[in-house]
Image (cartoon, rainbow, N blue to C red):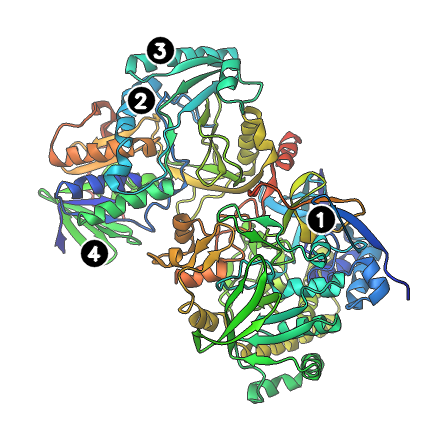
Amino acid sequence: MIVERDVVVVGGGPAGLTAAARLAAAGLTVTILDEQPELGGQYYRRPAPEVARRWGDHRREGGELIAGVRAAGVECRTGHLVWGLADDDRTLLAEDEAGRPVRLRGRHLVLATGAYERSFPFPGWQLPGVTTPGFAQHLAAGDHTPIGERVVLAGSGPFLLPVACSLLALGVKVAGIAEAGTPYRPGRRALGTLRHPARLRELAGYAARLARARVPVWQGAVVLRADGHDRVSSVTLAAAGRPGQAIRTVEADALCVGYGFRPQTDLARLLGCEVTADPGTGDAIPVTDPAGRSSRPDVYVIGEAAGIGGAPTARARGLAAAHDILARETGHPVPPAEARRVATAARRLGHFTALTDALYPSPAQLLDALVPALADSTMACRCESVTAGELRADAAGDVNAAKARTRAGMGPCQGRVCGFAVAGLVRGGAVFPSRVPIRPVRMTTLLELAAEDGPA
Amino acid sequence: MRAADVVIVGAGVLGAAAAWQLSRAGHRVVIFDRGAPGREGSGTTAGNLHVQAVHTRRPGQEVPIDSARFLPLQRAASDRWESVEDDLGASVELRRSGGFTIAETPDQCQELKEKHTWEAAAGIPTEVLDGDAAREALPLLGPTVTAATWCASDGYANPLKVTPAYLAAAAGHGAELVPYAPVREIARRGGTWRVTAGTHTVAAPVVIDVAGPWLGEIAALAGIRLRMTPVAIQMHATVRAPVTMSHLVQHIGEGLSVKQVTAGNLLIGGGWPARALNLAGRSVTSVDSLLGNVALAVRVLPFIRDLRLLRAWAGPLAATPDEMPLIGEVPGEPGFLVAGGTYAFTFAPLWGETLRGLAEGAPPPVEIADLGPDRLMTQTKTHEGRQR
Amino acid sequence: MTAPRSATIIVDGRPVTAVAGVSLTAALVGDHRWALRRNPVDGGPRGPFCGMGVCFECEVTVDGVPSVRACLTRIRPGMRVDTTGAPNDR
C-alpha cells in the first residue's frame, strides 16, 4: 500500500501532534504514524480507558490535543513501525500492527521521533526489576500499576522527581532518590529558573510532595551495584566523587535508573539530514533552523529528536514547523503576531532548559565520573552480553570498531541502550550509524513488500 | 624518515596476511591504513570460504568469472585455511562444515554437473545430489531445489576476527601498524620506495598495494594506472536463531549465500549491489537489493521466513573488470606489488604467502602469471609523479 | 465511582487478571512476573527495562506470534502469552 500525503509526520508525541493538527486544520492532507498502540508519545502517553475512567487522566491536555488532531482530519496510524527508506530516498517504509508493509510519501516529512532514556551500566543492571524511570512512570500513570513495593530511583535530572511523585500517588514506598549531581541547593543558577514561574512551580511542587512524604534525596550519589537472584532485592550506592566505594545499601524490589534523555535521530540520519554534536550533551542532533527545517529541504526534525527540551518546547517546535510548511505551501507567511508569539515562547523555553540543564551534571561529566569506576566484569551491552572489560581492551578507535570487535550493539536494540556507555568506554565518541532496518523487521513483512508492485 | 623492508598499504585481510607472512620471516614491516584496520571490504564481507567452484554472478555483474581457472587457487587456499588458527594462535571461528551449491532450473542442474567435472579434475571432491537427496542431507532446503553439489571443505571464518588475528600475530613478530594514516605520497628513487602517510615517511625496497577499493588510487600515487572497477555490495543479518544450519548454502544461478554464524544469526548475501559505492564514507544499502536477496533466501531456505531482519550493511568489493583476482608485481616498477580482486577473503592465506614469495624473489606457490597487473594497465608509467 | 473492568489473559497456561486494556507489561508486573525471557548469550533472566519499545527485553510470544514487545501491546481478554520460549531472539 502506498500512502501519498502533503505531509507525513513520524511520531505522535507533543511535537508531532501539534504540527499535524495545525497543518490539517489549514487543509493539508496529513498522516501521523507512531509505533505505540496509541497516540501521545511518551509524555502524553494515554492511560488505558479503564484507568482513566476510574482514576482520571494525569495529562488531560494530551487527550485534548489528540482529539484535536482527529477532529482536524489527520489520518492516524498507530502501531506503525517505520523501519526504512526506499531507494528513491523519500518513500518511508513501515510495517503496520498486523505486520503488513506500508509505504508513505509526503511532500514534506516531519520527524518527531522523540527521545529515549540515557542509561549507564552498573553490576546487576540486567536483573529483572531494574528499569528506566520512564517505565515506572508509564506503569504508574498509564496503567495504574506500581512497579514495586519499595523503589529506589537513581540517575540524574529533573525527571526523577515526577516519577517519584507518581509512585507516591500509588502508595508505593519510595526508599530514596539518588541524584548524581547536587542540583537541589540554593544558588545563582537555580535562581535563574525563577524567571519561568510556571515551570519552576512544577518542579517546586514535586519537591514539596517528596518532602511531605519524607523521601530522602541523596545528592551526589550513584548506583554502585544492584543485587538479587531472579529480581533485584537491594541497591548499593556510592558517592559520585568516589564511585567505587559503597556508602549505603538499600532494600528495594525495583530500581529505576536514568540519566535524562537522548534524541532519537535514526530516521533523520537515514534520510541524510546533517547532524552535529549538541553543545550541551554531546549527542548527535540534526542541524535545524528555528522552524525545524533540516539540511534536507523536505525534512523537518522537531521535538526531542531535534535536541532535548521538554514537552512545551516540543509543542512550540511543532507549531513553528507547521507555520513554515504552510508558508511554503500557500506563499503567504503566517500572520507575524502568531509567528512572533511562537518564536518568543520557544526562546523562553530554550532559556529555561539551558538553566535547568546547568543544575545537573552534563553527560560528559557523567562519563568522566562513571566510566573509570565501572568494573571490567560489568555487562555493558545487555543484548550481546558484552562486558566493560571487553570494550576497554584495545579501546583505541570508535564505537564502530568496538562493535566489530566485541559485538556490542549488534543485538536487537541495535546499540540504543548501551550506546552512551560504549562511546564512553572506547573514548571514541560518535554514535552507531543509522542503518536499514531501523528496528528489526519481520521477514514476512519484507516478503509482502517484495511482492508488491513499484519501487520499494 | 625510517627504513623498512616492506611497506604495506591497506590493513585489510590481504595486508594483514601478508604482514604476518613477512614479519614471521624476519622482514621489517610497516602497515598503513587510511582508517581503522579491517573495516572496509574485509570487515563487511560474508566470510565464506569458497572451495567448490564459485559460479554465481552478482546481480548486475557483467562478466562471469572463469570458474575453472579459480579451482586450483581455491584448492590451494583451502589447504592453507586448515592451519590458520594454529598459525595465529587465535580462534577465528573457522568452521569447515561443508556447503551446498543448489540449482532450481534444468539449466542450472546442467551447470552443476559441468562444475562437478571441473572440480574432480582439480582434485576438489564434490558430490552431485538430486533435489530429494539434497533435502535429505539438509532438510531446511525448500521444495524448489532440484539439485545440489555438496563440498565438505566449504566453510566460514569470522571476518571480524581474521584480520585482527593476523595483525596481532604480525605485531608479535614486530610488524608496525599505523591506522588512520592515509598514504599521500609514493615515490621511487632507484631501488627504494618512499611512502608518506600522515607524518610518517618510510623507505623500503618493496611496497605492497592491498588497498581494496582504493588499490587503483594508491597505485596512481606511484604513477601507475590500473583499471579497477570497485563496487559496493551488501549483506543482511537476521536476529539470533537456534543453531540449526551448520552448512554454507549458495545458489549456482542467482546471487545467494546463506549461513548461520556461531552466534546464531543467519547471514544472507550473494553480492547484491548497494545503492552506490561511497569511498568517502559508508555505502548506503539498497532496499530493492535487500528485498530481492531475502526473498531468494526464503525461497531456498523457507525457515528464514519466521525470523526478523536485524541489520543490513554495505561494503566495497575491489573488483577487476574481468572479475579475476589481481596479484603480482607491476611491470617496470620493481618492488611494487599489488593484490586484490574478488574472493580475496577466501584467498587471503594463499595471497599472503604469495606476496611474501614475490617480495623475497621466490617462486609463488601457485601459478599466477595470468593474474598480474599488466592486463589492467591502461598506460605505462608516465613519470608524471604523484597524482595529487 | 465504580470498580474498573478487568480482563483475564492466560500466561504460561495460568490465568492472570488485570485492569482491562492496560499494557501487557503492566499485567505481568502486576502479577509479579518479571522474568519474561532469557538472554540468548548468557541465559540469564531478563525483564522489561525501557517500557517504550527500545530495549527489546520484554519480548514474549502472544497468541503464537513470537517476539512481541509486551510494552507495546495492550491486553485483550483471553490473550495467550508465553514467556518460556527458547532463548533466542527470533
- The Cα–Cα distance between marks 1 and 2, rounded to whole angstroms, is 51 Å
Q: Residue at x 69, y 47 (%)?
A: A80
In the picture, the disc for residue B117 is: 3
Report the mark closest to the observer, 3 or 2: 3
| Disc 1 secondary structure class | loop
Locate residue B177, reporting x and y percent. Answer: 24, 51
Answer yes or no: is residue B387 visible: no
| Type of amino acid at the residue the image marks with label 1 | Gly
**Is tag 3's residue or tag 4's residue first in the polypeptide sequence?**
3
CA–CA distance in space, label 1 to label 3: 55 Å
The residues tagged by marks 4 and 2 sit, at their Cα atoms, a distance apart of: 38 Å
Of labels 3 and 4, the one closer to you: 3
Q: Residue at x 41, y 48 (%)?
A: A404
Chain identity of mark 4: B
Circle 3/circle 2 CB separation < 8 Å: no
Q: CA distance from mark 3 to mark 2?
A: 14 Å
Residue A114 to residue A355: above or below: above
Q: Which residue is mark 2?
A: B70
Q: Are marks 4 and 2 in contact (CB under 8 Å)?
A: no
Q: Residues within 10 Å of mark 1 (few under 14, many from 20)?
A: many
Chain at tag 1: A
